[in-house]
């Protein structure tokens, strides 16, 4: 049992490529270290310009994504059985993804990374990631739509 708070500095963590092809640094993992036993996990996602995550779902886990920084087009999440749903997320917005919903994140910016924090209602950020290759064609068909977003115009 811990008797004091734990301070976690995201930029001190090693960024690895996750199962869904996203750079991710584990911040809280209930299966190891000082945070063993935690009912939640957290990670820092750094998504490069133009990147698209593999189609996937989390059958048993709620996922919460807080975009910290992004280009003017924000972050995009496609979702649904044929990736017919689309969410534009700007920094400061929290996206809640229910268990079992197929989805894939994308960075439409040609030049800026997305930095986001991902929280999961399970002890390991690396568990309950099911890549859905059977949905890859649906996701690929959305790519022309996904990246044909007009740039946000200056208000000047």
Image: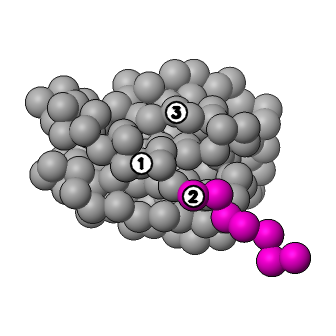
Q: Is the magenta stretch mostly helix, strand or loop?
A: loop
Residue 36 in the magenta stretch? The answer is no
3 and 1 marks in contact (CB < 8 Å): no
Task: Report, in whole angstroms, how far the alpha carbon at label 3 lies from the one at label 1.
Answer: 11 Å
Query: Going by the picture, which residue comes out furthest to the right?
Result: 156
Residue count near mark 1 (Cα–Cα under 10 Å), binned few <14, some 14–19, many ≥20: some
Callout 3–callout 2 Cβ contact below 8 Å? no
Q: In this view, does 45 lie above or below 134?
A: below
Colour convention: one colour
* Circle number at residue 146: 1
Q: What element carries label 3?
A: loop
Classify mark 2: residues with Cα within 10 Å, few (<14), some (14-19) or many (20+). Answer: few
Using the image, tell me which numbered label, if any, was put on residue 51: 3
Q: Which residue is drawn at 61% across and 51% down?
A: 116
Which residue has dot 2 on it?
150
Q: What element carries label 1?
A: helix
At 87% across and 76% down in the image, what residue appears? 156
Please give the count of numbered marks on the rendered protein: 3
Residue lying farthest to the bottom in this orientation: 155
Q: Can residue 68 be seen in this view?
A: no
Closer-to-camera residue (73/68): 73
| Lower sequence index among marks 3 and 2 | 3
Q: Where is residue 90 in the image (x, y as percent from the top left)?
A: 61, 66
Give the mark nearest the N terminus, 3 or 1: 3
Q: Where is residue 56 in the image (x, y as percent from the top left)?
A: 27, 38
Instruction: Give the Cα distance between marks 3 and 2.
Output: 18 Å
Which contiguous range is marked in magenta? Answer: 150-156
In magenta stretch: residue 151: yes
């Amino acid at each position: 049992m811990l008797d004091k708070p734990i301070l976690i500095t995201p930029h001190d963590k090693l960024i690895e490529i996750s199962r869904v092809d996203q750079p991710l640094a584990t911040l809280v993992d209930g299966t190891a270290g000082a945070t063993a036993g935690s009912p939640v996990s957290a990670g820092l996602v750094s998504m490069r310009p133009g990147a698209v995550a593999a189609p996937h779902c989390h059958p048993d886990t709620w996922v919460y994504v807080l975009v910290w920084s992004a280009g003017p087009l924000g972050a995009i999440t496609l979702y649904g059985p044929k990736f017919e749903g689309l969410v534009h997320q700007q920094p400061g917005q929290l996206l809640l993804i229910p268990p079992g919903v197929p989805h894939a994140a994308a960075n439409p910016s040609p030049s800026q990374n997305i930095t986001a924090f991902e929280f999961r209602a399970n002890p390991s950020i690396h568990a309950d990631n099911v890549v859905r290759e059977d949905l890859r064609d649906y996701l690929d068909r959305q790519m022309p739509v996904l990246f044909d977003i007009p740039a946000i115009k200056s208000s000047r």
